[in-house]
Amino acid sequence: MGEASRPYVICHMVPAVDGRIVTRHWDLSSTSTAEYERTAKTFGAEAWIIGRVSMEPYAGKARVPKRKSREPIPRKDFIANREAGHYAIALDPSGKLTWKSSSIDEEHVITVLSEQVSDDYLAFLQEKGVSYLFGGKKDLNLKRVLQKLAREFGIKKLLLEGGGKINGSFLAADLIDELSLLLAPVADGSIGTPSLFDAREGRGPARKLELLSARKRKEDLIWLRYKVKR
């Protein structure tokens, strides 16, 4: 399964040629979007993971009611469904996503929290049937989270499809095994918008890569696959 029994992590993204990843102004065709989804399926991953902001359109909006009980809820992982087979995972340390359902297109939802979230929010997740894992008291220990995903849900392969900060955090923690980049035929030219990896100010956690393949796809996309050297 990989180092310390964690899933094999593939960062799968559509960057511009200058590494920017905010696609809404690029006028990409539906064919390009379909190509992204098609190439993602070739990996046979059991799960995909993104951050809170990216997950908001999928989560929807619901009300988090106040609990009547004053009994504290222990900060223990809650597993609502470990037999789903496919999972949609959100990194939401502050517990801000208000889920309408416990699934996205039949993929069971798992949310990753810090121990700072409220009891009201934990009760809300339990009532919705959303599984949750604790990744740390305040900050998330990503390696620990991956090990839990492997142990509790049997996830062997995971697609990382986050924003620049989340991808950068995985890169800094040396938790990315492979890059799958559908390079869009776009020169973005923005300043201050997210790039593929935004780990930290100044010198970043540079990782050496080995090219596995380079293929031209539809709509002038180039599918690049790299293995992270260790």
Image (spheres, rainbow, N blue to C red):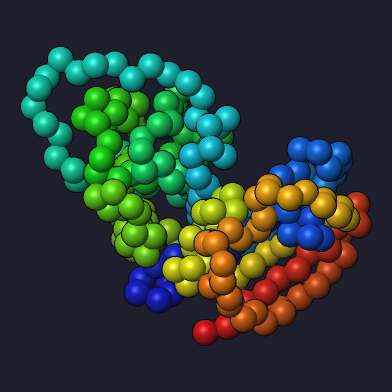
Residue 116 shown left or right of residue 103 in the figure: left
Q: Quadrant of the N terminus?
A: bottom left
Q: Is residue 220 visible?
A: yes
Question: Residue 65 in the image: x percent, y percent?
Answer: 29, 16
2 or 167: which is nearer to us? 167
As drawn, the residue found furthest toward the front would be 202
Question: Residue 93 in the image: x percent, y percent?
Answer: 36, 43
Residue 152 shown left or right of residue 195 in the figure: left
Residue at image location 79% in from the left, 60% down from the top = 18
Q: Quadrant of residue 143?
A: bottom left
Residue at image location 33% in from the left, 20% down from the top = 64
Q: Is residue 70 above or below residue 228?
A: above
Q: Is residue 9 above or below residue 129?
A: below
109 or 56: which is nearer to us? 56
| Number of numbered markers | 0
Residue at image location 82% in from the left, 47% down from the top = 32
Residue 227 shown left or right of residue 91 in the figure: right
Q: Is residue 111 visible?
A: no
Question: Residue 130 in the image: x percent, y percent?
Answer: 36, 34
As drawn, the residue found furthest toward the left would be 71
Q: Is residue 46 above or below residue 95?
A: below
Q: Is residue 43 above or below residue 108?
A: below
Q: Quadrant of residue 117?
A: top left
Residue at image location 78% in from the left, 64% down from the top = 223
Q: Quadrant of residue 100?
A: top left
Question: Residue 128 in the image: x percent, y percent?
Answer: 34, 26
